Image (tube, rainbow, N blue to C red):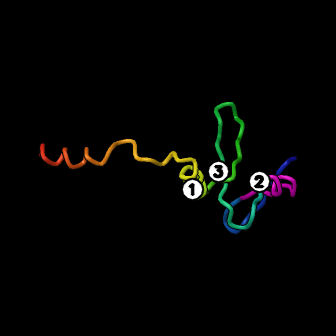
Amino acid sequence: MEPTVVRIGDTLGFKVSDEIIKSFDFKVGTKVKIDFQQNGNIVLRKKSKAREDWDSAFALYALEGEDNPMLPDFLDSETNTFL
C-alpha cells in the first residue's frame, strides 16, 4: 500500500486503504500513535485509552482470588505509634 499525502485544511494528512482501516478498527476520531524509528521506518499504532479494559481485568483477578491484601491491616496501626 502506498498512502497518499493530501491537504486537510492548513495541514497535511494521508489516506490509508480500507484494509488498514478494518485491521486497526479505525473510526472517525480514533487516536493514532506514530513512532519514527532511527532506521527511517514508521510504526503506526492505534492509541489505546488509558486504563482501557482494566475493569474487566480486575474483575477476573478478583474471581481468581488474587486480590487479597499482601500486607496485613495491623501494620498500619503499628506504624502510627512510631511517629
Name the residue at 86% across, 47% down.
2
Residue most toward the top?
Answer: 39
Q: Nearer the viewer, mark 1 or mark 3?
A: 1
Does the residue at mark 1 contact the one at mark 3 (Cβ under 8 Å)? no
Q: Quadrant of residue 51?
A: bottom right
**Mark 2 lies on residue:** 24
Q: Quadrant of residue 79?
A: top left
The residues tagged by marks 1 and 2 sit, at their Cα atoms, a distance apart of: 27 Å
Q: Position of residue 20 (x, y in %)?
A: 82, 52
The circle on residue 59 is: 1
Amino acid at dot 3: Lys
Q: Considering only vertical position in the picture, is 35 above or below 13? A: above
Name the residue at 67% across, 66% down.
10
Amino acid at dot 2: Phe
Q: Position of residue 48 (x, y in %)?
A: 63, 54
Callout 1 crowding tier (Cα within 10 Å): few <14, some 14–19, many ≥20: few
Q: Position of residue 3 (x, y in %)?
A: 82, 51
Left or right: 26 as drawn, with respect to 11: right
Q: Considering only vertical position in the picture, is 6 above or below 75? A: below
Does the residue at mark 2 contact the one at mark 3 (Cβ under 8 Å)? no
Judge whether residue 19 is colored magenta: yes
Left or right: 15 as drawn, with respect to 62: right
**SS of the residue at dot 1?**
helix
The residues tagged by marks 2 and 3 sit, at their Cα atoms, a distance apart of: 12 Å
N-terminal-most mark, 1 or 3: 3
Q: Quadrant of residue 53?
A: bottom right
N-terminal-most mark, 1 or 2: 2
The residues tagged by marks 1 and 3 sit, at their Cα atoms, a distance apart of: 29 Å
